[in-house]
Image: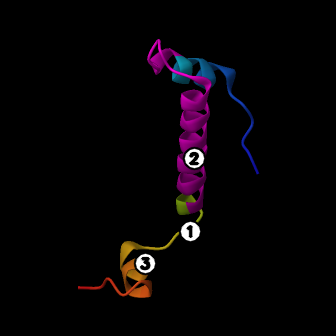
Amino acid sequence: MSAVLQKEEAHKLIDQMSPTATWDDLIQQIYVREVIDRGLADSQTGRGSCVQEVRAKYGLES
């Protein structure tokens, strides 16, 4: 579920972009921001996995 749009945050995101940015660039930045926010929320509520668990799951434990 998407978070409520914070217009001030959207303006900041756009202001940080290159003057030659495209709509696709903006959509990508919005997507990245949402994925990071979801990951942080998951981490704060304990729904994430620690690095060791992920490495073990994929056989990357060294």
* SS under mark 3: helix
Give the mark toward the camera: 2 or 3: 3
Above or below 41: residue 55: below
Tell me if mark 1 has few (under 14), some (14-19) or many (20+) residues whose alpha carbon lies within 10 angstroms of its own.
Answer: few
**In this picture, is 18 found above or below 57?**
above
Look at label 3 and name its amino acid. Val
The residue under the point 47% across, 20% down is: 17
The label shown at residue 16 is none
**Which label lies toward us, 3 or 1?**
3
Task: Name the secondary structure under disc 1.
Answer: loop
Distance in Å between CA atoms under marks 2 and 3: 20 Å
- Circles 2 and 3: CB atoms closer than 8 Å: no
Q: Quadrant of residue 18?
A: top left
Q: Residue at x 44, y 86 (%)?
A: 57
Q: Which residues are magenta?
A: 15-42
Labels 1 and 2: the sequence-earlier one: 2
- The foreground one among 49 and 34 is 34
Query: What residue sits right under mark 3 in the picture?
Result: 54
Residue at the left extreme, as displayed? 62
In the image, is residue 52 above or below residue 37? below
- Label at residue 37: 2
Secondary structure under the numbered disc 2 in the rendered image: helix
Is residue 16 one of those drawn in magenta? yes
Mark 2 or mark 3, which has the lower sequence index? 2
Q: Is residue 10 magenta?
A: no
Residue 52: % across, % down = 36, 79
Q: Dot 2 surroundings within 10 Å: few (below 14), some, or many (20 or more)?
A: some
The residue most toward the top is 19
Q: Residue at x 47, y 15 (%)?
A: 20
Residue under label 1, please give it.
46
Query: Is 14 displayed left or right of 55 in the figure?
Result: right
| Tag 3–tag 1 contact (CB < 8 Å) | no
